[in-house]
Image (spheres, helix red, strand yellow):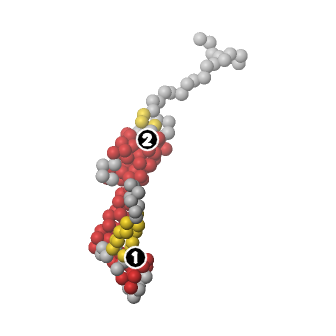
Amino acid sequence: MPPAGPGTLQAPIAPPYSPTRTSGLAIASMVLGILWIYWIGSIVALILGYLALREIKQNPQSMEGRGMAMAGVILGWVGVTTLLLAIAMGIYIWKHEEHPNSNDEQTARLIWGTADQPEVNSLTRICTRTSAFGDPPSAHTFTV
């Protein structure tokens, strides 16, 4: 074949084909974020998700899986947030069981006033209700 001259067109050369592959870290991050395995999976999903995002950023032409890595990171943060809320609720319940009446007495004083008032000493409320059958209202006394 003769060399190309000034008037001939030559086909552009295609870049070499490099197959892309999905990041294994991204897959693992998403799976652990979904499973959460008693919150350990959420923490590992965060770590693997951030490692996968860094790996994909370094090799964008040969690495895929950014969406899976982001899903793993998001689900990991949801799991960690749930863990922190569960710990906070556990501490609150534990403290409340340790001193069960202290808050109730303080709340009663704030709502009902001082113990010097005779109507407040018993913390009694009278409620009236009418039955579904049209019976006359009856008084019920509840002591708090």
Residue underneath mark 1 = 107
Q: Position of residue 38 (x, y in %)?
A: 30, 52
Instruction: Name which residue lies at 61% across and 19% down.
Output: 11
Q: Give the position of the N terminus as an image quadrant.
A: top right
Which residue is identified by label 2? 68
Amino acid type of the residue tagged 1 in the rendering: Thr
Q: Nearer the viewer, residue 7 or 3?
A: 7
Task: Give the x, y percent position of residue 16.
Answer: 50, 27
Measured as percent of width and height from the top left, residue 34 is found at 37, 44
Residue at mark 2 to residue at mark 1: CA–CA distance: 50 Å
**Residue at (35, 60) in percent of width and height:** 86
Quick one: 118 or 114, which is closer to the camera?
118
**Which residue is drawn at the image coordinates 35% and 69% (left, top)?**
140
Name the quadrant of the C terminus. bottom left
Give the residue furthest to the right: 7
Q: Secondary structure at mark 1?
A: helix
Q: Nearer the viewer, residue 138 or 59?
A: 138
| Residue toward you, 105 or 39 | 105
Kindly identify the amino acid type of the residue bearing the numbered disc 2. Met
Above/below status of 124 relative to 54: below
